[in-house]
Image (cartoon, rainbow, N blue to C red):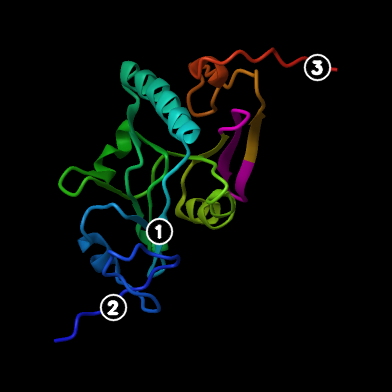
Amino acid sequence: MKAREITVATVVPLQSKIQPRQTISLDEFFALPEGPPYYEFEDGELILMSRTHSRHQKVALRLGSALDAHVTSQGLGAVWPEIEVHLPAERRVYAPDLVFLAVEHLDHHNEEDGRIHGVPDLVVEILSPSTESRDRTRKLTSYQRAGVSWYWLVRPDDLGVEEYRLTPEGYLLAQTITAGQPFTPGLFPNLTLELAALMGENVGPVTEE
């Protein structure tokens, strides 16, 4: 019997058996061998995920460590880096840079397959030139429709943060943080993050004119 061919949305390494111009089911996606290469899943298509820049990785590490320390010490829930998030209503599977589940939603995490099946309380995407457009459009729309309460976009170049809060009308840009400004997330009012300090960088304080 001829093996079924599966599509990808971008160029795939030659060693991959995945071929273009077909769709893949969610079950087939879940049955793929563990990467590399790594993919996200959108409406039957595989999206090849490229390696991120070292600065992107460092921002994710430092920010994730700070969030993890806070939510663990306060008993608020759990944080994961790059965990696969299955949004059932959207037929999509993403692997955000950081994900937070509150205590009351920890049952969304499946210990057996290592994925989150359901809606996270917070998704953090650290922007890269190759992914920024998707993070600001298709992913933002998917997270909004799925009901993700908080969505952060972090700019690794200047350490800026855009914090979006879900409202009945959709995502509201709740805060825009620039370099040198402390960030007190709406989700974590007892936490103040200073990304420059986390990165070990000296950024002068922001002054108002």
- Residue 37 point in image, percent of width and height: 31, 55
Residue type at numbered disc 3: Glu
- Residue 100 point in image, percent of width and height: 38, 35
- Mark 2 closeness class: few <14, some 14–19, many ≥20 residues within 10 Å: few
Provide the residue designation for mark 3. Answer: 208
- 1 or 2: tag closer to the N-terminus: 2
**31 is higher (above) or lower (below) than 149:** below
- Mark 1 closeness class: few <14, some 14–19, many ≥20 residues within 10 Å: some
- Figure quadrant of the C terminus: top right
In this image, 61 relative to 196: left or right?
A: left
Provide the residue designation for mark 1. Answer: 48
Q: Residue 79's quadrant in the figure? A: top left
Provide the residue designation for mark 2. Answer: 5
Nearer to me, 100 or 96: 96
Which residues make up the magenta segment? 156-172
Find out whether residue 139 is within the magenta segment: no
Residue type at numbered disc 2: Glu
Which residue corresponds to the image point at 56% horizontal and 33% vertical from the top-left? 156
What's the distance in space between the residues labelled 3 and 2, CA to CA?
A: 58 Å
- 3 or 1: tag closer to the N-terminus: 1
What's the distance in space between the residues labelled 3 and 1, CA to CA?
A: 43 Å
- 3 or 2: tag closer to the N-terminus: 2
Which residue corresponds to the image point at 19% horizontal and 49% vertical from the top-left? 113
